[in-house]
Image: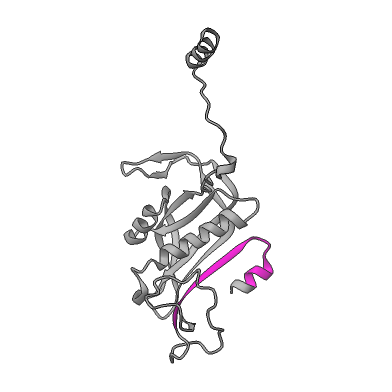
Amino acid sequence: DLRLRRERGTKRNDMFVARRIVPMDSPDARLHLPPIVDFSRVYNLDEEVRRDYARAEVVGFCEVTERTYGMRTNLLEDEGGGSTLSANALSFSHIDRPLLTNLSVARNARNNGIGGKLLEACEDIVLYSWLPNPCEVILEVDGDNPEALEFYKKRGYQIMFTDPAQRRFRADGLLLQKERCTKICMRKRLLRPTPRPRETDQQPAFTTDLSAILQTIKDGVFS
């Protein structure tokens, strides 16, 4: 599905996948995948990196896609610090934005930081690789999913507005059916960390205090 969308569309799309890693001699190792050489993106490895490891089953994934997304500008603040749609909300800002979707982690792999790392990977690829560099990531959360809402809040996402007229697929039956639901739009501003100046780049200290400058001149003249 991802490959087809990339071939058909011109907009940017990136997906990140998290896999469990196991020793090469483990029966769970995927034989068609090469052994892991670069351990810079391996997390929570308790054992020494002296053994040969291979990738195993997928335990999580996340996707970020460039989409034209309308952001309403006339919002009403609610008591919870978020925003709701105004009754006469007619002002939109339709621009291409990075939309985060499909963040999912297997139940038996949760509470290990996998979701947070996948989220960071999507934010980093947007901030450092997409051109022109966007300064935000947006996403939508189901209104009846407080755990996801809290997860994103802890990572800097803020509620922009709620839309009670959205629809989603029900997956609890034999046939996929759409049902009405409330979606919460969240947004995070992306800021590049300011690099620390190198010692060779540091400028000599100086003062802009006029009285201190005048006192220095006076001391030099009358000394």
Question: What residue appears at the point 52 percent right and 69 percent down from the top-left corner?
Answer: 16
Total numbered labels placed on residues in the image: 0
Q: Answer with the quarter of the image where residue 104 lies.
A: bottom left
**Residue 36 sits above or below residue 9 on the image:** below
17 magenta-colored = yes
Residue 213 vs 81, above or below: the answer is above
> Residue at horizontal 55%, vertical 9%?
221
Magenta highlight on residue 8: yes
In the rendered image, residue 77, in percent from the top left (x then y), is placed at 38, 39
- Residue 40, placed above or below residue 209: below
How far across and down, in percent of the image, does residue 129 sit? 61, 57
Quadrant position of the N terminus in the picture: bottom right
Residue 126 x, y percent position in the rendering: 57, 56
Q: Kindly identify the residue that appears in the image at 46 percent across and 80 percent down.
A: 50
In the displayed structure image, the side of residue 39 where residue 128 appears, left or right: right
Looking at the rendering, which quadrant does residue 179 occupy? bottom left
| 159 relative to 95 in the view: left or right | left
Q: Which residues are magenta?
A: 4-22
- For the view shown, which residue lies furthest in the top direction? 222
Q: Is residue 174 left or right of residue 194?
A: left
Identify the residue at image location x=47%, y=50%. Answer: 188
Q: For this rendering, which residue is in front, 110 or 143?
A: 110
Image location (x, y in percent) of residue 63: 52, 65
- The image's colouring method is one colour
